[in-house]
Image (cartoon, grey):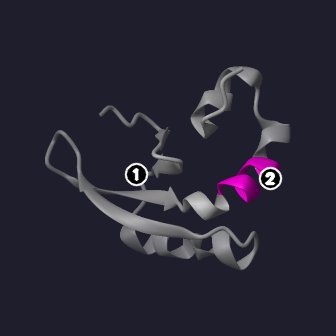
Amino acid sequence: MNYGDGCFYENTLKLCIDNFTKDEVLTLKVLYNKFGLKATMNKRTNPSNSVVWTIRINRKSMGLLKSLVIPYLIPEMLFKLGINN
């Protein structure tokens, strides 16, 4: 699977944040503290064998996430949230 900058997969959203350090990713707890989004940090190995991080937004938080971000997305990007336009 080619993640690019992220993808909608199995009713969750995966954000690829390859250039963030682990400590920087941990500061993204603001997703829960400020917005109530349940998310996990996941480690993966990219094609060049470097360890990089992704954030997975829990499927139970997808409705909330959509209500927060849809007003700011152009229609061509709605597929990133699993919305067919």
* Residue at x 26%, y 55% (from the top left corner): 44
Write down the region rendered in magenta: 62-68
Q: Is residue 66 left or right of residue 52?
A: right
Residue placed most toward the observer, 67 or 50: 67
* Residue at x 41%, y 34% (from the top left corner): 4
Question: Where does residue 53 sit, x and y in percent of width and height?
Answer: 36, 58
Against 72, is 23 above or below? below
SS majority, magenta: helix
Q: Is residue 46 left or right of residue 31?
A: left
Question: Which quarter of the image is occupied by the C terminus?
Answer: top right
Q: Is residue 83 left or right of residue 74?
A: left
Between the residue at mark 1 and the residue at mark 2, the CA separation in whole angstroms equals: 24 Å
Closer to viewer: mark 1 or mark 2: 2
How many marks the image carries: the answer is 2
Q: Check disc 2 and report the residue beneath it.
A: 68
* Residue at x 80%, y 52% (from the top left corner): 68
Question: Where does residue 45 sit, x and y in percent of width and height?
Answer: 21, 52
**Amino acid beneath label 1:** Asn
The 10 Å Cα crowd at callout 1, few under 14, some 14 to 19, many 20 or more, is: few
